[in-house]
Amino acid sequence: MKKYLLAVLVDNKPGVLTHVSGLISRRAFNIESISAGYTEEEAVTRINIVVSVESENELDQVVNQLSKLIDVIKIVNLTKYDSIARELVMIKVRATRETRAEIIDVVNVFRANIVDVTPENVVIELTGQQSKIDAVIEVLSEYEIIEIARTGAIALSRGPVPVKKM
Protein backbone atom coordinates (compact mmCIF):
# COMPACT_ATOMS: atom_id res chain seq x y z
CA MET A 1 0.00 0.00 0.00
CA LYS A 2 1.24 3.44 -0.88
CA LYS A 3 -0.02 6.69 0.62
CA TYR A 4 -0.97 9.69 -1.52
CA LEU A 5 -1.85 13.19 -0.36
CA LEU A 6 -4.66 14.80 -2.36
CA ALA A 7 -5.63 18.46 -2.17
CA VAL A 8 -9.29 18.73 -3.14
CA LEU A 9 -10.86 22.15 -3.67
CA VAL A 10 -14.65 22.08 -3.27
CA ASP A 11 -17.57 24.45 -3.03
CA ASN A 12 -18.04 25.62 0.55
CA LYS A 13 -21.45 23.98 1.08
CA PRO A 14 -22.93 21.70 3.74
CA GLY A 15 -22.53 17.99 3.03
CA VAL A 16 -19.63 18.20 0.56
CA LEU A 17 -17.14 16.60 2.96
CA THR A 18 -19.59 13.74 3.51
CA HIS A 19 -19.96 13.19 -0.24
CA VAL A 20 -16.19 13.18 -0.79
CA SER A 21 -15.38 10.82 2.09
CA GLY A 22 -18.36 8.59 1.30
CA LEU A 23 -17.30 8.16 -2.32
CA ILE A 24 -13.78 7.12 -1.27
CA SER A 25 -14.98 4.69 1.40
CA ARG A 26 -17.61 3.14 -0.91
CA ARG A 27 -14.76 2.26 -3.26
CA ALA A 28 -13.12 0.43 -0.31
CA PHE A 29 -10.08 2.71 -0.26
CA ASN A 30 -8.67 3.55 3.13
CA ILE A 31 -8.61 7.19 4.22
CA GLU A 32 -5.51 7.56 6.41
CA SER A 33 -6.41 11.15 7.31
CA ILE A 34 -8.81 13.84 6.18
CA SER A 35 -9.01 17.51 7.12
CA ALA A 36 -11.03 20.37 5.75
CA GLY A 37 -10.84 24.10 6.18
CA TYR A 38 -11.35 27.51 4.70
CA THR A 39 -9.14 28.85 1.94
CA GLU A 40 -8.20 32.31 0.74
CA GLU A 41 -11.53 32.30 -1.15
CA GLU A 42 -14.69 32.40 0.97
CA ALA A 43 -16.67 30.15 -1.39
CA VAL A 44 -14.00 27.40 -1.48
CA THR A 45 -13.07 24.74 1.08
CA ARG A 46 -9.86 22.74 0.84
CA ILE A 47 -9.98 19.07 1.82
CA ASN A 48 -6.63 17.37 2.43
CA ILE A 49 -6.93 13.60 2.11
CA VAL A 50 -4.27 10.96 2.62
CA VAL A 51 -5.42 7.72 0.94
CA SER A 52 -3.81 4.28 0.88
CA VAL A 53 -4.10 2.43 -2.42
CA GLU A 54 -2.37 -0.55 -3.98
CA SER A 55 -1.49 1.13 -7.29
CA GLU A 56 -1.54 4.30 -9.37
CA ASN A 57 -4.54 2.80 -11.23
CA GLU A 58 -6.54 2.70 -8.00
CA LEU A 59 -5.50 6.28 -7.25
CA ASP A 60 -6.64 7.32 -10.74
CA GLN A 61 -10.00 5.66 -10.01
CA VAL A 62 -10.37 7.70 -6.82
CA VAL A 63 -9.45 10.95 -8.58
CA ASN A 64 -11.74 10.26 -11.56
CA GLN A 65 -14.69 9.44 -9.31
CA LEU A 66 -14.09 12.52 -7.14
CA SER A 67 -13.85 14.77 -10.18
CA LYS A 68 -17.39 13.70 -11.19
CA LEU A 69 -18.87 15.18 -8.01
CA ILE A 70 -20.60 18.44 -8.85
CA ASP A 71 -19.11 20.37 -5.90
CA VAL A 72 -15.49 19.40 -6.66
CA ILE A 73 -13.57 22.24 -8.28
CA LYS A 74 -10.04 20.82 -8.49
CA ILE A 75 -8.03 17.77 -7.35
CA VAL A 76 -4.24 17.78 -7.15
CA ASN A 77 -2.08 14.84 -6.11
CA LEU A 78 0.51 16.73 -4.06
CA THR A 79 2.59 13.55 -3.79
CA LYS A 80 3.71 14.23 -7.38
CA TYR A 81 4.94 17.74 -6.59
CA ASP A 82 7.62 19.25 -4.43
CA SER A 83 5.52 20.10 -1.40
CA ILE A 84 5.63 20.79 2.31
CA ALA A 85 3.46 18.50 4.46
CA ARG A 86 2.84 18.94 8.17
CA GLU A 87 0.70 17.49 10.94
CA LEU A 88 -0.31 18.87 14.30
CA VAL A 89 -0.50 16.62 17.34
CA MET A 90 -1.48 17.23 20.94
CA ILE A 91 -0.34 14.61 23.44
CA LYS A 92 -1.45 14.35 27.07
CA VAL A 93 1.23 12.59 29.12
CA ARG A 94 1.16 11.53 32.76
CA ALA A 95 3.76 13.66 34.57
CA THR A 96 4.82 13.27 38.16
CA ARG A 97 7.17 15.54 40.06
CA GLU A 98 9.92 12.99 39.31
CA THR A 99 9.28 12.70 35.54
CA ARG A 100 8.31 16.28 34.66
CA ALA A 101 11.91 17.47 34.03
CA GLU A 102 12.61 14.48 31.76
CA ILE A 103 9.44 15.17 29.77
CA ILE A 104 10.41 18.84 29.42
CA ASP A 105 13.79 17.70 28.03
CA VAL A 106 12.02 15.54 25.42
CA VAL A 107 9.73 18.47 24.52
CA ASN A 108 12.76 20.73 24.02
CA VAL A 109 14.66 18.20 21.89
CA PHE A 110 11.69 17.91 19.51
CA ARG A 111 11.03 21.69 19.57
CA ALA A 112 7.53 21.04 20.84
CA ASN A 113 5.52 23.20 23.26
CA ILE A 114 3.88 22.47 26.56
CA VAL A 115 0.44 24.07 26.34
CA ASP A 116 -1.08 22.88 29.63
CA VAL A 117 0.25 21.64 32.96
CA THR A 118 -1.62 20.07 35.89
CA PRO A 119 -0.21 18.27 38.93
CA GLU A 120 -0.91 14.93 37.16
CA ASN A 121 -0.12 15.57 33.49
CA VAL A 122 1.18 17.86 30.73
CA VAL A 123 -0.25 18.54 27.29
CA ILE A 124 2.32 18.82 24.52
CA GLU A 125 1.77 20.40 21.10
CA LEU A 126 3.98 19.58 18.12
CA THR A 127 3.88 20.43 14.43
CA GLY A 128 6.01 18.54 11.93
CA GLN A 129 6.33 15.74 9.45
CA GLN A 130 4.64 12.44 10.23
CA SER A 131 8.00 10.81 11.05
CA LYS A 132 8.80 13.48 13.65
CA ILE A 133 5.41 13.07 15.30
CA ASP A 134 5.76 9.28 15.31
CA ALA A 135 9.21 9.66 16.92
CA VAL A 136 8.03 11.94 19.74
CA ILE A 137 5.11 9.59 20.45
CA GLU A 138 7.53 6.66 20.68
CA VAL A 139 9.77 8.50 23.16
CA LEU A 140 6.87 9.83 25.24
CA SER A 141 5.27 6.37 25.45
CA GLU A 142 7.80 5.64 28.23
CA TYR A 143 5.90 8.16 30.39
CA GLU A 144 2.33 6.84 29.90
CA ILE A 145 0.48 8.66 27.17
CA ILE A 146 -3.07 9.38 28.33
CA GLU A 147 -4.49 10.78 25.10
CA ILE A 148 -3.46 11.78 21.57
CA ALA A 149 -5.21 14.00 19.01
CA ARG A 150 -3.67 14.29 15.50
CA THR A 151 -4.84 16.43 12.61
CA GLY A 152 -3.53 14.33 9.76
CA ALA A 153 -1.43 15.78 6.98
CA ILE A 154 -1.97 19.12 5.32
CA ALA A 155 0.32 20.34 2.56
CA LEU A 156 1.17 23.18 0.22
CA SER A 157 3.20 22.94 -2.96
CA ARG A 158 6.53 24.76 -2.99
CA GLY A 159 6.87 27.80 -5.19
CA PRO A 160 4.46 30.49 -6.36
CA VAL A 161 1.80 28.33 -8.07
CA PRO A 162 -1.27 27.57 -5.90
CA VAL A 163 -3.19 24.30 -6.18
CA LYS A 164 -6.09 26.04 -7.94
CA LYS A 165 -3.75 26.83 -10.86
CA MET A 166 -1.99 23.45 -11.09
Image (spheres, helix red, strand yellow):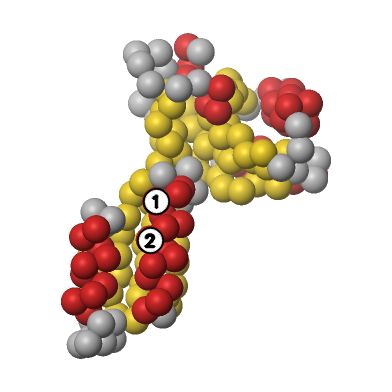
Residue 152, x across and y down, in percent: 49, 48
| Left or right of residue 122: residue 8 | right
Secondary structure of the residue carrying tag 1 is helix
> Which residue is labeled 1 in the image?
132
The Cα atoms of the two marked residues, 2 and 1, are separated by: 6 Å
Residue drawn at the location 59% of the way across and 40% of the way down: 50
Q: Residue at x 55, y 28 (%)?
A: 79
Residue closest to the eye, 27 or 56: 56
Q: Are marks 2 and 1 in contact (CB under 8 Å)?
A: yes
Where is residue 3, by image quadrant? top right
Q: How many marks?
A: 2
Q: Is residue 127 left or right of residue 29?
A: left
Task: Point out which mark residue 92 bears.
Answer: none
Q: Is 59 located above or below residue 109 in the figure?
A: above
Residue of label 2: 136
Q: Is residue 87 left or right of residue 117?
A: right
